[in-house]
């Protein structure tokens, strides 16, 4: 073997993939079983698609699907363009030190866990000494319990998601922007084009492939509304609009011990997401000539 050293390098990755990604897929069999703890997964009776049918016919189905799609839809509408806009703005900055400082500040939230992020939000927005409500009081306004009122749940989820992920997401677009030929900008400037025209006619068309691929991934993950973020921001007052597929799976599996039902919901989510990504990929290839396969 000529490249045995290189194969040794990838061996840990292959082992990790088999142990943590493929071996757990054996548990997906639970979705088709009436699970009995004493009989185990293989010994439990096979019930076919009964668990899937039960979930689709239950009143919880439309509630959790609606909440999941609304939250993910808002994240795509407002959160997807945010890193593109940030990358375009950073690309226009000519001061290298200022640019690096802004980039570092925008990346930092990505490394903060949602537990810490939500704790910070609680301290900032609390009506008992939080800075936002202190400012409101200074102007004679009443305090608002932002984290506990239903109408503020979606804005809190979307804004915190943008704050946490926009900087990290902009790295991909900055990499794509670094590959745009400067000669195109010089030629456009000679022809009298300003910054906006250069951005519209040169920059965006040059990175449309990257934008298209990232959009396909975003649509494919539309049922991933942000499990840890939503779970931590969930309050009794907003449960009606904050119960998503992932939190519902957790509560069904752990709180009620219905592992087979929770597995069926998780498998349904994966199949639906794959179908959606395949559809988006087809549309993207047809209209933008961009696809991931």
Image (spheres, grey):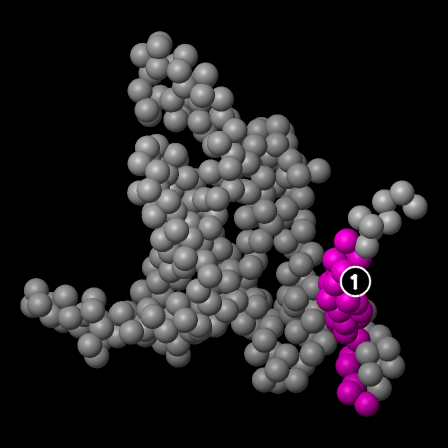
Magenta stretch: dominant secondary structure: helix
> Which quadrant: the C terminus?
top right
Camera-nearest residue between 33 and 234: 234
Picture layout, residue 24 above or below residue 236: above
Q: Can you see residue 45?
A: no
Farthest residue in the top direction?
A: 191
Highlighted range, magenta: 9-38
Whether the magenta-drawn stretch holds residue 32 is answered as yes
Residue at figure coordinates x 67%, y 51% from the top left:
274
Residue 131: x and y in percent read 20, 69
Residue at figure coordinates x 40%, y 25% from the top left:
200
Residue at figure coordinates x 79%, y 62% from the top left:
15
Residue 95: x and y in percent read 31, 36
Camera-nearest residue between 164 and 293: 164
Name the residue tied to disc 1: 15
All told, the count of numbered labels is: 1
Picture layout, residue 237 above or below residue 88: below
Q: Quadrant of residue 120?
A: bottom left
Residue at figure coordinates x 46%, y 67% from the top left:
113
Residue 226: x and y in percent read 50, 62
Decide if residue 157 is on the left or right side of residue 53. left
SS at badge 1: helix
Decide if residue 156 is on the left or right side of residue 110. left
Decide if residue 263 is on the left or right side of residue 89. right
Farthest residue in the right direction?
A: 1
Picture layout, residue 14 above or below residue 54: above
Whether the magenta-drawn stretch holds residue 257 is answered as no
Farthest residue in the bottom direction?
A: 38
Q: Residues within 10 Å of mark 1 (few under 14, many from 20)?
A: few
Q: Quadrant of residue 253?
A: bottom right
Residue 72: x and y in percent read 49, 55
Q: Can you see residue 139?
A: yes
């Amino acid at each position: 073997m000529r490249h045995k050293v290189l194969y040794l390098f990838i061996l840990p990755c292959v082992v990790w993939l088999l142990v943590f990604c493929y071996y757990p897929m054996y548990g997906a069999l639970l979705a088709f079983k009436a699970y009995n703890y004493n009989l185990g997964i293989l010994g439990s009776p096979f019930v076919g698609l009964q668990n899937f049918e039960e979930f689709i016919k239950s009143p919880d189905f439309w509630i959790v699907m609606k909440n999941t799609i609304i939250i993910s839809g808002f994240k795509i509408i407002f959160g997807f363009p945010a890193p593109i806009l940030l990358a375009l703005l950073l690309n226009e900055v000519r001061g290298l030190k200022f640019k690096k400082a802004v980039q570092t500040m925008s990346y930092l939230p990505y490394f903060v866990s949602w537990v810490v992020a939500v704790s910070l939000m609680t301290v900032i927005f609390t009506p008992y000494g939080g800075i936002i409500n202190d400012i409101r009081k200074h102007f004679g306004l009443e305090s608002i319990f932002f984290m506990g009122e239903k109408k503020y749940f979606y804005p809190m989820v979307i804004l915190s998601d943008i704050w946490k992920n926009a900087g990290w997401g902009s790295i991909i677009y900055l990499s794509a922007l670094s590959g745009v030929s400067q000669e195109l900008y010089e030629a456009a400037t000679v022809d009298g084009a300003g910054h906006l025209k250069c951005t519209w006619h040169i920059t965006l068309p040059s990175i449309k492939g990257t934008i298209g691929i990232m959009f396909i991934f975003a649509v494919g993950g539309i049922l991933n509304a942000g499990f840890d973020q939503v779970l931590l921001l969930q309050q009794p007052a907003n449960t009606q609009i904050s119960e998503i597929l992932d939190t519902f799976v957790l509560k069904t599996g752990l709180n009620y011990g219905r592992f087979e039902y929770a597995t069926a919901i998780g498998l349904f989510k994966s199949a639906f997401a794959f179908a959606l990504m395949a559809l988006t990929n087809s549309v993207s290839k047809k209209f933008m000539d961009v696809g991931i396969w």
